[in-house]
Amino acid sequence: MVREILLGDNPFIGVSHLAQEKAREEKKNLPTVRSRAAVIEAAVEGGVTGFTFSTHALNYELLQYMLDNHPVTLQALNYYILTPYAQSYVRQANLFGTAGLAKSLLRDIVLENPAGVLSALFTLDFDKIAGLFISREARPYLKILPKERVKAILLHEVLTELIIAFDLADLLQELKKYIETRLGVGFGVETRNIHRLRSFLDEHSLSVEYVMTPLNPLGYQMGVREEAEDSVKALSSRGAKIIAVNILASGACTLEESTAYLSRLKQYIYAVAFGTSKPDRAKANAQHLRSHLE
Amino acid sequence: MSSILHRDLLESLCPEVVGWEGYTRRADLKIAVVGFGKMGLLHSGIVNLLIPNAVKAIVDKSILITFGISKIFNSVKFYRNLDGMLDEAKPDAVYVTTPTPSHYPIAKHLLERGINYIFIEKPPTTDYETTYQILSRKKSDQHIMVGFQKRFALTFRHAKLLIDSGIIGEVVNVYSYIRSGDILKHTNRFNPLGRGVLLDLGVHLVDLLSSFFKIKRVRQAEYQSMYTRVDDFLRADLETEDCARVSLEATWSDPEYRLPETYIEVQGTHGTLKVTEDYLKVSTSAEHPLLGNKREIALYKPHYYQGIPPVNLADPEYTLENIHFLRCIYEGGEPLTSIENSLSTMRLIDEIYEKAKIRV
């Protein structure tokens, strides 16, 4: 049974996985902070129980606005924070080179937490620096949001896929430990390779509380669909909470097609996320998803 | 799924995925990567997702990477010296993902050391002459693939199929651009190269146009510098052998483009075709079987990439490109974007720069 319907942030920050052209059009008419707050309010009316978002400056602005103007709604929602916001780092790497980006990041982390970096260097525990990096990204949001409502910090897919690709079990463990114990929040990963994630976790006898992954009738961004579905079932059976994203295949299928597909898997799915910039649609979609999946 | 994109068509657009698991079952394959920046990380990540632990060695001159990162990446051995890596790791294939000016000396060295499969990130070198120099040093059993990954995007492959099939009639006019918002602050990174956006980003568009059309000459070209001393914006007019006009623009300084986008609009005697990495739109004067007996189609990425590629890291064309390279290693074939096939692209790049009269 799906326990939560979440609102996603892509339309709020001008991201479209269908086409850049669409994203640019949307960005020109990017909703104001007040309109974004109205979408959240409408979504909550429709039954949305949580907000999943990237650590993008526009989301910080939105949550600060919610704190000031809609504190009751802010208190009522659960939060799933996706970090880091990878695209901003890609741009910096293009400007300064990857080594330049790494130096600048390290400098910022040292300035913010010199003791933590020194300890990592003395013990040659470089995985610890990754924890400090994630903490640096998430901390501003953790200051705004009610602590008990932040359900998880999830690693952005680029980071997850690299952890799987390079078999970085120690790094994943360190990040999990840091987020769960130091930040006191649930830990999760976002992936477009859930089948590979499952093998990786099995091989190292690891577990994660949340797994966010695309699930849609077209198999878009899912790898081989049957393998992805098998892995959703297997991971869910072992206690991982599966959060389905990109359920509309970036707009290539309808909400009805998507719910028909997700219904087959609903006993394995913990939460379903969708995005929109329109209050009416936010409410209607939330109601539709609740009535078919909960 | 859109009715025209049936399995047979998808497989013909993307032969790499047919039996892809066969190419990636070589447990003994040893891959090395020279240059562990953004592209080195991307390619090695994809290769390892396809064949777990295939990447055995990484060479990088940065101490931060060879010392710091190597403490985290335990499954790979890091080197600061290329020969040291070649002697010890004995790789079957090497990816060269260093900054462009170093491609030539590294590729030359790898050829001399007898590496048979080399992948060079785009652009292969800074100009036609050095690209040719690499080619001339290559033995017949050595293969070099260039990272022109746009050629592996299914939208572009489908577009080429439709243009070649004459769906829009004879090509009359082409408008195209490649734009990104990567360089919006002053940087000196590209000045020593003497070439800017056309070589770094525009080379993809030039490569696609060269594969779509027979370009005869460069009519005119002009450029602008905004954040560097090289071309941040470049516009050129080309002409095909059939006298169609082709205009191209390349910029890395357009703030509206969060991600790079390549756009090609082809006007033919019977219709128009518009294609980007994200979609293909065709409008013709008559119904056609290749359009599902319609006059118009609009297909987006989710229509093409259904269960394809088998693993995902960044845009799907990168994975398809890497599967293609692995297939060449497995079967011993010539890559689609071989250094031989890249010569015409690099010649055209030189001609456009010559016409634009860039002086740094």
Image (cartoon, grey):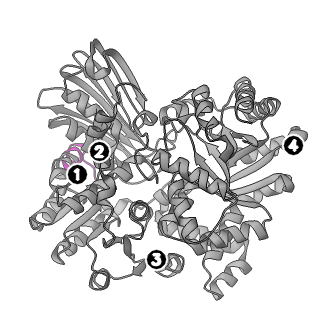
- The amino acid type found where label 3 is placed reads Ser
Quarter of the image where the C terminus of chain B is located: bottom left
- The amino acid type found where label 4 is placed reads Ala
User: In the figure, residue A290 lies in which quadrant?
Assistant: top right
Q: Find disc 4 in the rendering and name its residue.
A: A76
Q: What percent of the width, then of the height, locates residue B303?
A: 43, 33
Q: Find disc 3 in the rendering and name its residue.
A: B75
> Disc number at residue B151?
2
Q: Residue at x 11, y 68 (%)?
A: B137
Quarter of the image where the N terminus of chain B is located: top left
Considering only order in the chain, which callout, 2 or 3, is on the residue closer to the N terminus? 3
Q: Are marks 2 and 1 on the same chain?
A: yes
B351 in the magenta segment: yes
Q: What is the secondary structure assignment of the residue under circle 4?
A: helix
* Mark 3 belongs to chain: B
Vertical relation: A24 (above or below) A171: above
* Mark 1 belongs to chain: B
Q: Residue at x 27, y 69 (%)?
A: B93
Q: Find disc 1 in the rendering and name its residue.
A: B337
Dot 4 crowding, Cα within 10 Å, few <14, some 14–19, many 20+ = few
Vertical relation: B263 (above or below) B22: above
Q: What is the secondary structure assignment of the residue under circle 2?
A: helix
Q: What percent of the width, then of the height, locates residue B316?
A: 41, 47
Q: Are marks 2 and 1 in contact (CB under 8 Å)?
A: yes
Residue A286 is left or right of residue B331, and the answer is right
* Mark 2 belongs to chain: B
Frontmost of labels 3 and 2 is 3
Q: Which residues are magenta?
A: B350-360
